[in-house]
């Protein structure tokens, strides 16, 4: 007999309440009862025959068996290991595995209230924990539904934030930053909803909206100011890059807005490079088509630098957390200095984010940083406001 099948005689115990559960079972033949020991009696909570599964709860959430299992006839069963099942649940969509766990907890707490084996305190703690998980999940689902509606009703606005040349403070381009004006929540921070969009497939329609509208708003600025020497940086997530329609949408947005691929920088964070060689291949394809690639949030995520030798990035962006702590924390100053020196060695121009003070600007200039953006110059603004801003822009030093 194969070691994944087991035979039991009528009356044999298959497992007992409290046993460690590392296998689930499918009944191949015979009959199995799941029983709960009560104070003065035994309650049969289910009776299983050919094709039915039991013992799966303990192996999914790792808690001990919550009931006894007995063969009531001569029975043959197939065993499924914990690893086999866990692997499948882990691979499932996070929402599905969450639902499975919630359902299992619910069944368990029903069983507990029948068995009365647990203390009231334990019961209450479990119920509270379940409620917390349920609320987080429900909140997330609500937020996701609102985001779906927001895409349908076009509740987003594309803002632009100027990027200046550090040496002479000339305006060189903009970063396109999305804003969600929700009728329910008001302005929602992009890192909050873009994070959720990235967890789901919503990043695809939202990312396509970003590509189209970043090009559209940027082209409006070029048309109305008569300037052609500017660029626009567009934030792109890893999932978006791997979408089949990404290039088609990007190229269409570029052409329809009458801008050149050379005027567009795609900003990717270091963290997407962890997703493997495919991402590097996609980025190289973008470069071949004339688009530039900027490495965003440098130094905050991925710890390997090997990708810097596998592909030539057009810019490295120093995260605003470094820029802003440069004067309070000598270590940050050293880190910024080291990033700039490394980028200079690699001949990659550096963009520093989050410049709020003249002191920060001067330090970055002294260190040889190439470009900068931050509230010292302008917050992200709608295209019309950017046009006015450009007319009145005065260098700070
Ligand atoms: P990020 O790509 O690092 O964008 C820079 C963030 O720094 C922006 O925040 C910008 O408004 C903010 N910032 C710029 N200068 C200053 C400054 O001087 N001081 C301070 N305190 N902040 C400054 P924002 O617009 O809230 O965006 C947050 C993040 O959301 C972005 O970080 C990016 O990761 C994500 N995001 C925004 N728009 C998009 C988008 O269109 N697509 C994608 N995939 N992600 C986006
Ligand atoms: Ca960015
Ligand atoms: Ca950044």
Image: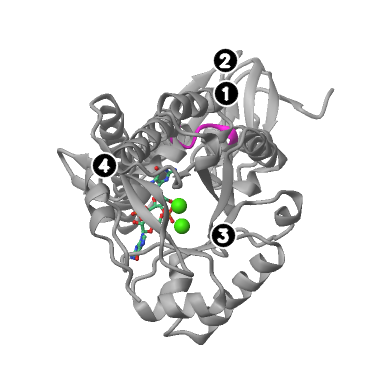
Q: State yes or no: residue 315 in magenta.
A: no
The circle drawn on residue 180 is 4
Q: Which residues are magenta?
A: 91-95
Classified by dominant secondary structure, the portion drawn in magenta counts as: helix
Element type at mark 2: loop
Instruction: Return the residue at label 2.
Output: 49
Q: Earlier in the sequence, mark 3 or mark 1?
A: 1
Tell me the crowding category of disc 1: few under 14, some 14 to 19, or many 20 or more residues within 10 angstroms, Cα based.
few
Q: Position of residue 4 (x, y in %)?
A: 76, 28
Gap in angstroms between the C-alphas marked 4 and 2: 54 Å
The residue lying at 59 percent from left, 29 percent from top is 70
Element type at mark 3: loop
Q: Nearer the viewer, residue 35 or 366?
A: 366
Q: Earlier in the sequence, mark 4 or mark 1?
A: 4
Tell me, yes or no, whether the two marked residues, 2 and 3, touch with CB atoms within 8 Å.
no
Query: For residue 212, what is the image quadrant?
Result: top left
Looking at this rendering, what residue extends furthest in the front direction?
Answer: 226
- Front: mark 4 or 2: 4
Q: Position of residue 121 (x, y in %)?
A: 31, 58
Check mark 4 vs ligand 1: CB closer than 8 Å? yes or no.
no
Instruction: Return the residue at label 1.
Output: 244
- Front: mark 4 or 3: 4
Looking at this rendering, what residue extends furthest in the left direction?
Answer: 183
Instruction: Return the residue at label 3.
Output: 301
Gap in angstroms between the C-alphas marked 1 and 2: 47 Å
Gap in angstroms between the C-alphas marked 4 and 3: 26 Å
Tell me the crowding category of disc 3: few under 14, some 14 to 19, or many 20 or more residues within 10 angstroms, Cα based.
few
């Amino acid at each position: 007999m194969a070691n994944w099948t087991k035979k039991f005689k009528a009356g044999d115990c298959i497992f007992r309440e409290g046993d460690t559960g590392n296998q689930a079972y499918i009944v191949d033949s015979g009959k199995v009862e799941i029983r709960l020991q009560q104070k003065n009696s035994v309650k049969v909570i289910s009776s299983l025959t050919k094709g039915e599964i039991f013992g799966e709860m303990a192996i999914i959430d790792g808690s001990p068996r919550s009931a006894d299992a007995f063969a009531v006839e001569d029975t043959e069963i197939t065993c499924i290991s914990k690893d086999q099942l866990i692997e499948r649940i882990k691979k499932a969509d996070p929402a599905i595995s969450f639902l499975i766990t919630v359902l299992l907890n619910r069944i368990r707490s029903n069983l507990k209230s029948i068995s009365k084996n647990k203390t009231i305190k334990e019961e209450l703690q479990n119920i509270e924990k379940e409620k917390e998980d349920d609320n987080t999940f429900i909140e997330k689902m609500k937020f996701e539904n609102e985001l779906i509606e927001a895409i349908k009703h076009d509740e987003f606005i594309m803002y632009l934030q100027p990027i200046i040349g550090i040496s002479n403070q000339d305006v060189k381009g903009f970063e396109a930053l999305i804003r969600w004006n929700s009728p329910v929540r008001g302005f929602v921070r992009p890192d909050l909803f873009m994070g959720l969009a990235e967890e789901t497939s919503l990043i695809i329609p939202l990312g396509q909206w970003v590509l189209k509208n970043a090009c559209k708003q940027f082209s409006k600025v070029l048309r109305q100011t008569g300037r052609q020497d500017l660029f626009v940086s567009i934030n792109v997530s890893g999932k978006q890059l791997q979408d089949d329609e990404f290039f088609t949408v990007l190229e269409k947005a570029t052409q329809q807005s009458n801008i050149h691929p050379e005027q567009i920088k795609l900003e990717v964070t270091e963290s997407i490079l962890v997703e493997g060689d495919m991402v590097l291949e996609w980025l190289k394809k973008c470069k071949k088509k004339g688009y530039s690639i900027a490495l965003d949030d440098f130094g905050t995520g991925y710890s390997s630098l090997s990708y810097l030798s596998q592909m030539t990035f057009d810019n490295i962006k120093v995260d605003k957390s470094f820029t802003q702590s440069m004067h309070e924390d000598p270590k940050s100053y050293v880190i910024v200095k080291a990033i700039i020196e490394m980028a200079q060695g690699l001949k990659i121009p550096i963009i520093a984010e989050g410049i709020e003070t003249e002191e920060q600007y001067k330090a970055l200039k002294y260190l040889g940083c190439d470009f900068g953006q931050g509230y010292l110059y302008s917050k992200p603004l709608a295209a019309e406001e950017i046009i006015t801003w450009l007319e009145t822009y005065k260098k700070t030093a």
